[in-house]
């Protein structure tokens, strides 16, 4: 059967993010307002991985009164005590207010904002680069899922636009199950120019997109220094960014659907790289 068109990323349901109505019903009081430059992380895995990574400053841990104190929570409590982070028991409704009704699992951690790296850090050793470039992903759940896979395959860095795209927010950290806390991420103003810099450093740039003339991913070179570019939900890779790619690859679709979710398309492409290099 002839390969079908590539998976163009499609928006997935924003599960796990604060619901608009819930945000209106649960508003954090001034006692729990995050100071400038800080934010409340929530969810057991998100909090645990942030503490494990130790890339942020930690200010305060809130736990639901009467909640579980075993397993992951026991590890969290042990780590914050080791770091001398204040611990406070609060009512679950207080945590609902902090998170806009999201699934906080009875724990919230006040931490400094996510530590983005300058782009130069991701190209400090270009001969070993395995980069993932995300062109304007806007759905927090998709972004979190992509970043979780990126950490699982041990990319050396993730590049995303500073504007008109989702950043690494607490919702994204939660959606990634905390994996993004271990990933080096750079935000850039101009993605097309950034790809030029990657190519100047000897990085091979592969766009994953349903574009005319795209080759099946299985036939595309994926060895050496590499940057995979994945487009946004619905729109795919923007034209100016696509033009900077050394080659454009498509994921063969052999069934009746015409596209894949952005997170799924990224996962397939990333694991094809891993398979080739095994």
Image (cartoon, helix red, strand yellow):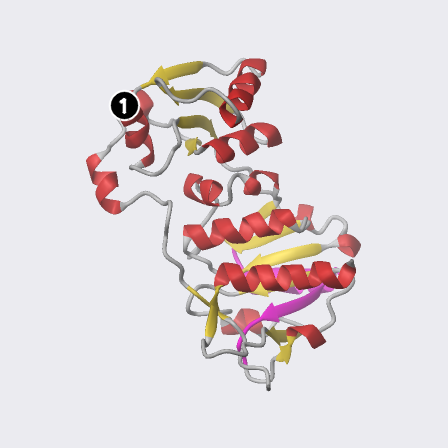
User: 73 and 226: which one is in front?
Assistant: 73
**In which quadrant will I find the C terminus?**
bottom right
**Residue 70 image point, x, y percent:** 50, 21
Dividing the image into 4 quarters, which one contains the N terminus? Answer: bottom right
- 136 falls in the magenta region: no
Say left or right for 177 vs 184: left
Q: Name the residue under label 1.
A: 30
Q: How crowded is mark 1: few (under 14 residues within 10 Å), some or many (20 or more)?
A: few
Q: What residue is shown at x 52% (from left), y 55% (from top)?
A: 189
Q: Quadrant of residue 78?
A: top right
The one nearer the camera, 278 or 36, is 278
As rendered, which of 229 and 200 lies closer to the eye? Answer: 229
Q: Residue at x 56, y 33 (%)?
A: 49
The count of marks equals 1
Q: Which residue is drawn at 27% across and 23% down?
A: 30
Q: Residue furthest bottom?
A: 2
Q: Which residue is drawn at 36% across and 45% down?
A: 17
- The reply to whether residue 197 is in sight is no
Residue 180 drawn at (x, y percent): 56, 43
Q: What stretch is highlighted in magenta?
A: 189-211
The front one of 70 and 77 is: 70
Residue 231, x across and y down, in percent: 51, 65
Instruction: Note whether residue 257 is visible.
Output: yes
Q: Is residue 193 magenta?
A: yes
Q: Is residue 256 left or right of residue 272?
A: left
Is 116 rendered above or below residue 98?
below
Circle 1: element type: helix
In the depicted structure, whether residue 68 falls above or below residue 96: above
């Amino acid at each position: 059967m002839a390969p079908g068109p590539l998976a163009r990323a499609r928006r997935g349901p924003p599960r796990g993010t604060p619901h608009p109505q819930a945000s209106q019903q649960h508003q954090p009081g001034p006692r729990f307002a995050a100071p400038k430059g800080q934010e409340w992380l929530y969810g057991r895995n998100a909090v645990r991985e942030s503490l494990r990574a130790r890339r942020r400053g930690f200010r305060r841990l809130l736990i639901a009164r009467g909640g579980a104190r075993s397993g992951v929570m026991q590890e969290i409590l042990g780590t914050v005590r080791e770091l001398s982070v204040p611990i406070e028991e609060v009512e679950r409704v207080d945590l609902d207010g902090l998170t806009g009704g999201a699934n906080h699992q009875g724990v919230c951690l006040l931490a400094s904002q996510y530590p983005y790296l300058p782009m130069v850090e991701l190209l400090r050793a270009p001969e070993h680069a395995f980069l993932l470039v995300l062109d304007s992903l806007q759905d927090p759940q998709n972004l979190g899922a992509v970043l979780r896979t990126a950490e699982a395959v041990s990319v050396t860095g993730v590049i995303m636009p500073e504007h008109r795209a989702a950043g690494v927010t607490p919702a994204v950290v939660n959606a990634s199950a905390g994996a993004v806390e271990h990933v080096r991420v750079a935000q850039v103003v101009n993605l097309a120019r950034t790809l030029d810099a990657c190519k100047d450093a000897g990085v091979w740039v592969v766009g994953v997109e349903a574009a005319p003339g795209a080759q099946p991913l299985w036939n595309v070179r994926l060895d050496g220094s590499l940057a995979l570019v994945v487009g946004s939900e619905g729109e795919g890779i923007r034209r100016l960014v696509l033009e900077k790619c050394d080659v454009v690859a498509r994921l063969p679709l052999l069934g009746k659907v015409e596209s894949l979710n952005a997170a799924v398309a990224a996962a397939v492409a990333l694991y094809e790289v891993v398979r080739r290099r095994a």
